[in-house]
Amino acid sequence: SIIGLALDGEAVLSNQNEGIYAQASEVLASNNIISANHGAGIGGSDMGLTLTGSFIGLTLSGDAAGNAGHGIETEGSPGIYINGATKHNIISANQGDGVHIFNNCGGNNDVDEGILVGNYIGTNVSGLVIDGFGNGGSGVRIDEWNGFCASVENVQVGGVNVADENIIAGNTEDGVRV
């Protein structure tokens, strides 16, 4: 799917909020282009997410067209799998964090598990740091929001195999902030 851009994957046709918003549901996204939205590219609460081979913040040709919020933002999750090990996810040029995973004391919003492997975060499609491709916040931010009343546990960034390596570079703030 192409979300936030025209069918050519280049011209901007922004959504006024998130490109995809899910609440208490499972999102399976593969080979998508989600860019130029006024909120996060993908956002949600208590959302399970599996993402592979997608551009978040880029056009079809790989030009920067970031989302006005975070690339991916999830408040609580039973499982987040941002897996670019076989086909990279490129999460770049967003005004907020590339990926923001957090809990919230306002409900049952624990983060139970997360795996981020094989992604390019803050780079161009070749994994290079180029002006305009870094995210405006951190590459990956994992935190407990609004206090310590819910937990964020078992989040893995990278792995032991070459295909599991993330390139997280060129972002305005930290590469990974926990």
Image: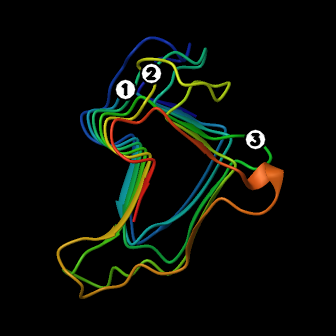
The numbered mark, 1 or 3, whose residue comes first in the sequence reads 1
Crowd rating for badge 1 (residues with CA inside 10 Å; few <14, some 14–19, many 20+)? many
Q: Quadrant of residue 50?
A: bottom right
Q: How many angstroms separate mark 2 from mark 3 (CA)?
A: 21 Å
**Residue type at numbered disc 1:** Ala
**Residue type at numbered disc 3:** Lys
Badge 1 element = loop
Position of residue 161 in the picture relative to residue 90 (left or right):
right
Q: Which residue is mark 1?
A: 36
Badge 2 element = loop
Badge number at residue 5: 2
Q: Residue at x 37, y 46 (%)?
A: 138
Q: How many angstroms separate mark 1 from mark 3 (CA)?
A: 22 Å
Q: Quadrant of residue 19?
A: top left
The numbered mark, 2 or 1, whose residue comes first in the sequence reads 2
Task: Name the front one of labels 2 and 1.
Answer: 1
**Residue type at numbered disc 2:** Leu
Q: Quadrant of residue 57?
A: top left
Q: Which residue is mark 3?
A: 87
Q: Residue at x 59, y 36 (%)?
A: 32
Above or below, comparing residue 24 to residue 17 in the picture: below
Q: How many angstroms separate mark 2 from mark 1 (CA)?
A: 7 Å
Position of residue 132 in the picture relative to residue 54 (left or right):
left
Of 32 and 88, nearer the camera is 88
The x and y percentages for residue 151 are 36, 84
Question: Which quadrant holds the C terminus?
Answer: bottom left
Question: Which quadrant holds the N terminus?
Answer: top right
